[in-house]
Image (cartoon, grey):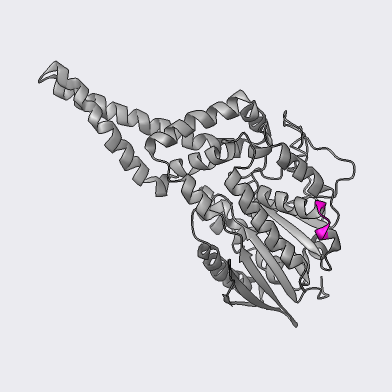
Amino acid sequence: MNMQQIKRRKVFYIPGFDPFPARRYRELYRSNSQEQAAISDYTISQSALHLKDGFGWQVHARFGDQSSEAEIEVLVWSDLVKDTMRAGILATYLQLLRTAWIYVSTGALADVIKLRKGPVVAALYPVGFLLGQGMIALAIAFIFGSILANIQPYLFWLGAVLIWPVLEIFRRLDGRIFAYYLMQDYAFTAQFGGAYPPGLNHRLKQFGQKVSQALAQDWDEVLVVGHSSGVHLAVSILAELGRRGEIGRASMPVGFLSLGHVVPMVTFLPNAAELRRDLQDLSCMGDVFWVDVSAPGDGCSFALCDPVAVSGLVLEDKTGPLVISAAFTQTLSPERWKSLRWRFFRLHFQYLCAFDRPREYDYFQITAGPVSLRHRFQDRQASKSRIETAFARHRDMA
């Protein structure tokens, strides 16, 4: 850990199902890296990075007498998310019915429930809120119609005109409730039964080309970071590059950092055969050092669940991932943990933020520091509380 291996690093960050522009991640990195540097006693700064067909930033850091730099590029698919989120009120309720039917009829929901309760609650949250909103709208319409019926009985049905305006008010408040957002997230995942939509498949090929180009350049490390739904996208990208032999031929170490994954929401579906194959292939590639970080305090992820093992892919020659915990209750002070404990969406992004009681996990040292991912964690033992039991009933691979 005291020896410098990395002076120049290329980082690809793949966000989850997020409609916000990539600059959000730049500002999140800027503010939190400064906070973490002050806590952990190092210096870090950012500068502009001009990419022809992408978005990113340059990072300059100094850790004691060692200096290093990183080029961080966000692999953007927020435009695809925005297209999905254009669905109106009626379309969203139809998505609710279709998505619920897919997860229930295929047995995926039953399997997921056995695995972790937190993500299941997160999945049922939009269903409950949308149904609740519908019931409130119907109740208001009924009350208004009953009042009108006292004037003329046939006026009762005029109460129905209030249903749509009430639902529209709820939709406009979704920036605080997130019911529509989460429903459209799960609907996007389930629409092809776990298979990638054509538009996303095309985007993954473009992402793969970017990583391929970096593997042919003069970097000291290429690091791919996937967060939330971005984890399984990264798995597919790296698995394909590995099958083509590009990772094996690379002159630099290749690392994969997966954060707060939701892989079972996809791999437990029947048509996720290609992703299951990608998981299997990547987990056996010794050329990619894979570290999976999650925390039981993050109710939106499958915390400490080995995404390969729980998907039923039990392999003798498996080399990854190394499953470890960010341990929010220990790496965050009691005061900060208390302030964040019930802010579930904020906690899901804590992996990208500063810790006021940091241990070995430091997002900014990993992405901009002088030590490779492999050397940082190669002697780290996997979390004893990790889950490696196979829960998925659908295990066929493409």
| Residue at (20% x, 27% y) in the render | 144
Q: Foreground residue, 56 or 115?
A: 56
**Residue 327, can we see it?**
no
Q: Position of residue 165 (x, y in %)?
A: 27, 37
Q: Foreground residue, 298 or 17?
A: 17
> Which corner quadrant of the image does residue 73 belong to?
bottom right
Q: Main secondary structure of the magenta part?
A: helix
Q: Position of residue 250 (x, y in %)?
A: 83, 65
User: For the N terminus, which image quadrant?
Assistant: bottom right
Q: Position of residue 32 (x, y in %)?
A: 57, 67
Q: Which residue occupies the extreme left position in the image?
A: 151
Q: Position of residue 110 (x, y in %)?
A: 64, 27
**Residue 396, can we see it?**
yes
| Residue at (73% x, 31% y) in the render | 391
Check if residue 344 falls in the magenta segment: no
User: For the C terminus, which image quadrant?
Assistant: top right
The residue stretch that appears in magenta: 243-247
375 left or right of 159 in image: right
Picture layout, residue 108 above or below residue 18:
above
> Which corner quadrant of the image does residue 3 belong to?
bottom right
| Residue at (16% x, 17% y) in the render | 154
